[in-house]
Image: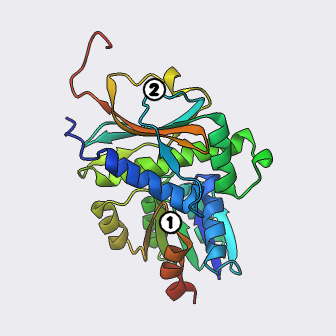
Amino acid sequence: MSVEVEVDESDLAEMVEQVWESYLDPEGVSPLIPTYDENQASEVHSSVSITGSWSGHVVYASSTAAARRAAAAFLAMELEEVSEEDISDTLGELANIVGGNVKAMLPPGAQLSLPQVVLAPESTARYPNAARISGVYGLWEGEPVSISMWQISSETKEDGA
Amino acid sequence: MKILIADDSRVMRQIVVRTLRQAGFGDHDLIEAADGQQAYDMALSEKPDLIISDWNMPHLTGIEVLRQIRATGNNVKFGFVTSECTPEMKEAAEASGSAFFIVKPFTAERFDEVFAPILG
């Protein structure tokens, strides 16, 4: 059975800030500006699943332009050099980094999956019996980026709601 | 020194290589493995002096790689660079003879702190 999650929005925001400081914005000139808009659009997303002491998904979603910019920053490349594979690999790693940091804050006995990447909006994803419990939503150089947590209900629902 | 970087993420291997260079360790011979099995195979065939490994990888996880390498009697310096860091993982790593634990996201300063004593 899942426990109450002990990772809140400020924890997520701190992890996101570290990712920006380390890889996406080491110069500290283009931070993620919060919008608090959980309905903001995305074009691509990636996720890792956590099972055990807490069960759910950590999802990174953004526009394609923001994903391209992230790949350029990760790989130290120019934007126009970035391939679709670079974008996929970067998205997978972003979900893995945030998911791993989330897992580290959970009670012992949680397992982290390998990342999944989908070059389609987060709104196309279906996480059965899971509800979004927290998230960081923002704009990075004007492009939408979000990181959110979906918790799987410990009760089995038959209506799929 | 020959350094083996094991991570299933090509992007992360590249970031590790770049961060090693930024921290001043770019002159070492850097080789890469794309999953746990390859890391194990290369640990034996390439005889690196240092292995920097991810934890969560296909085929063999990082800790399985470390245990299997140690089981052959090989005492190569080995440590983890991973996004996950729980007390149980650290304990398991240390019990198996891991020399360090670096958490992603990391900085060049963190690399310098960990690798300066090892690489000189």
Residue B51: x %, y % from top left:
55, 71
Q: Where the N terminus of chain A falls, by quadrant? A: top left
Residue type highlighted by circle 2? Asn
Residue type highlighted by circle 1? Phe
* Dot 2: element: loop
- Visible residue check, residue A7: yes
Image-based side of A78 in relation to A2, left or right: right
Q: Residues within 10 Å of mark 1 (few under 14, many from 20)?
A: many
Q: Which mark is residue A39?
A: 2
Q: Chain of mark 1?
A: B
- Visible residue check, residue B55: no
Residue nearest the observer in this picture, A130 or B75: A130
Q: Where the C terminus of chain A falls, by quadrant? A: top left
Name, please, the residue furthest toward the right.
A80
User: To which quarter of the image does residue A134 belong?
Assistant: top left
Query: Above or below — where is A124 with respect to A61?
Result: above
Image-based side of A81 in relation to B117, left or right: right
Residue nearest the observer in this picture, A86 or B1: A86
Q: Which mark is residue B106?
A: 1
